Amino acid sequence: MSRPWEADPETTFKKRLGKSALELGATNSGPECPDIWELENGDIAVIGRDLTASLGTRLPDGVSISRDERLVVIPRSMLIAAKPDIPRV
């Protein structure tokens, strides 16, 4: 049975949503930074710390992580900074 949505591995990055981790003070420098991006196909890519192993064991009822998914954590300030860039519809 196929899923109603699948991630498109052929899409590309369109624009950052919000501010960079450096601008928000969430990193000192370097490429190991959390980030939020809109993709060319309209989907959203989130780069963050993989906490699937630790938080994945404490999921709320009705929440699950598929074998090909990861639970990723980003700083709260990063999502708040991205809010103006996220369409209402």
Image (cartoon, rainbow, N blue to C red):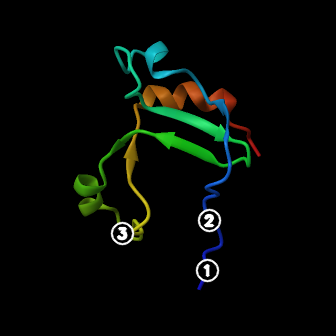
| Closer to viewer: mark 3 or mark 1 | 1
User: In the rendering, at what x and y percent does residue 31 appear?
Assistant: 41, 25
In percent of the image, x 73 and y 43: which residue is there?
Answer: 40
- Element at badge 2? loop
Nearer to the camera, 39 or 19: 39
Give the residue type at disc 2.
Answer: Glu
Cα gap from disc 3 to disc 1, whole angstroms: 24 Å
Q: Secondary structure at mark 1?
A: loop
Name the foreground residue: 7 vs 76. 7
Discs 2/3, front:
2
Q: Residue 16: image x %, image y %?
A: 62, 29
Q: Earlier in the sequence, mark 2 or mark 3?
A: 2
Q: Quadrant of residue 37?
A: top right
Give the residue displayed 32% in from the left and 62% down from the top: 59
Per the image, the residue denoted by label 3 is: 61
Residue 14, picture quadrant: top right
Say what amino acid the circle numbered 3 marks. Answer: Asp
The reply to whether dot 1 and dot 2 touch (C-beta < 8 Å) is yes
Q: Is residue 25 above or below residue 65?
A: above
In the depicted structure, whether residue 67 falls above or below residue 53: below
Report how far apart the C-alphas of labels 1 and 2 lie in the structure.
Answer: 9 Å
Q: Given contact means CB atoms under 8 Å apart, are the residues at marks 3 and 1 in contact?
A: no
**Residue density around tag 1, few if under 14, some if 14–19, many if 20 or more, within 10 Å:** few
Residue with the most extreme front position: 10
Residue 18, how many percent across, how many down?
Answer: 59, 25
The local secondary structure at tag 3 comes to loop
The residue that mark 2 highlights is 6
Lateral position of residue 21 relative to residue 51, left or right: right
Q: Which mark is residue 2?
A: 1
Residue 79 location, x and y as percent? 51, 32
Dot 3 or dot 1, earlier in sequence: 1
